[in-house]
Image (spheres, helix red, strand yellow):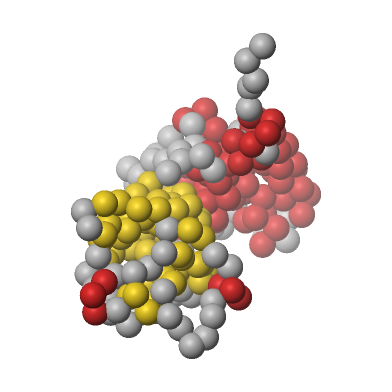
């Protein structure tokens, strides 16, 4: 179901004086929310960054939910950096070949979810312009054009996005009975998806539970 059909779905089921931009705004809110269980095990890679002498902060070039790993290429070898807690960074800062990385959260720029991170040690001149590979969990691009189709969310679940949007729109119109009805539909569908997908995510099980010992 593309964006044009999602807007039409809302209009035919909730009769109110709403503009298309109002509907699209809340469709995107619920689209981002509903897609999260489906992106939990999806990985993308960004290779647009390299180390810069003396630079302490780096910003991922794509919208994302979280950074998973960072690799660096040194002496023609790709190496995984260890993740560290930012509170463990020691001062004065060490310089040299980065061996660790730490999350700095999102950059705060309106309309984006660009993750920031730091490297430790801070790159020096001898370790300037080394290729970085950032592996991350992607966040879907917002729907904008009529033909845009929700990514990651299966086709058969696209209508759930509209249910969530209608709940929010009705609440804003103070049509609380309608809002409660659609929110109930959306919440039940969302919880079912969470149980089926996020509940079975690999990250939810300790390593010991995934190990199989030969008999």
Q: Quadrant of the N terminus?
A: top left
x then y, percent, for residue 114: 42, 65
Above-or-below relation of 206 to 92 = above
Which sits in the foreground, 108 or 57? Answer: 57
Instruction: Establish if 139 lies above or below 101.
Output: above
- Give x and y (percent) for residue 139: 45, 52
* Residue drawn at point x = 52 percent, y = 28 percent: 156
Can residue 5 be seen here? no
Q: Is residue 208 toward the left or the right of residue 25 in the image? A: right
Q: Residue at x 48, y 58 (%)?
A: 82
Left or right side of 176 for 138: left
Q: Is residue 86 above or below residue 202?
A: below
Q: Nearer the viewer, residue 69 or 44?
A: 69
Whether residue 51 can be seen here: yes
Q: Going 43% across and 80% down the picture, which residue do you hit?
A: 94
Q: Position of residue 66 (x, y in %)?
A: 50, 56
Q: To which quarter of the image does residue 128 belong?
A: bottom left
Q: Residue placed farthest to the top in the image? A: 215
**Looking at the image, which residue is at 44% across and 53% down?**
69
Name the foreground residue: 2 vs 49. Answer: 49
Q: Quadrant of the C terminus?
A: top right
- Camera-side residue of 123 and 154: 123
Number of on-image labels: 0
- Picture coordinates of residue 55 (x, y %)? 34, 80
């Amino acid at each position: 179901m593309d964006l044009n059909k999602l807007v039409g779905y809302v209009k035919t089921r909730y009769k109110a004086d709403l503009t298309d931009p109002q509907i699209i705004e809340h469709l995107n809110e619920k689209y981002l929310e509903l897609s999260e269980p489906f992106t939990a095990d999806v990985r993308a890679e960004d290779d647009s960054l390299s180390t810069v002498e003396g630079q302490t902060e780096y910003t991922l070039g794509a919208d994302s939910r979280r950074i998973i790993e960072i690799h660096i290429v040194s002496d023609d070898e790709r190496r995984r950096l260890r993740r560290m807690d930012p509170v463990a960074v020691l001062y004065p800062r060490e310089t040299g070949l980065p061996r660790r990385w730490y999350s700095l959260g999102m950059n705060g720029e309106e309309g984006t979810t660009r993750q920031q991170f730091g490297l430790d040690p801070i790159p020096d001149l001898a370790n300037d312009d080394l290729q970085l590979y950032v592996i991350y969990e992607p966040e879907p691009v917002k729907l904008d054009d009529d033909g845009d189709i929700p990514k990651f969310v299966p086709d058969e679940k696209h209508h759930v996005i509209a249910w969530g949007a209608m709940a929010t729109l009705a609440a804003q119109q103070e049509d609380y009975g309608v809002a409660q009805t659609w929110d109930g539909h959306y919440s039940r569908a969302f919880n079912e998806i969470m149980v089926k997908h996020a509940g079975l995510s690999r990250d939810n099980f300790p390593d010991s539970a995934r190990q199989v010992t030969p008999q």
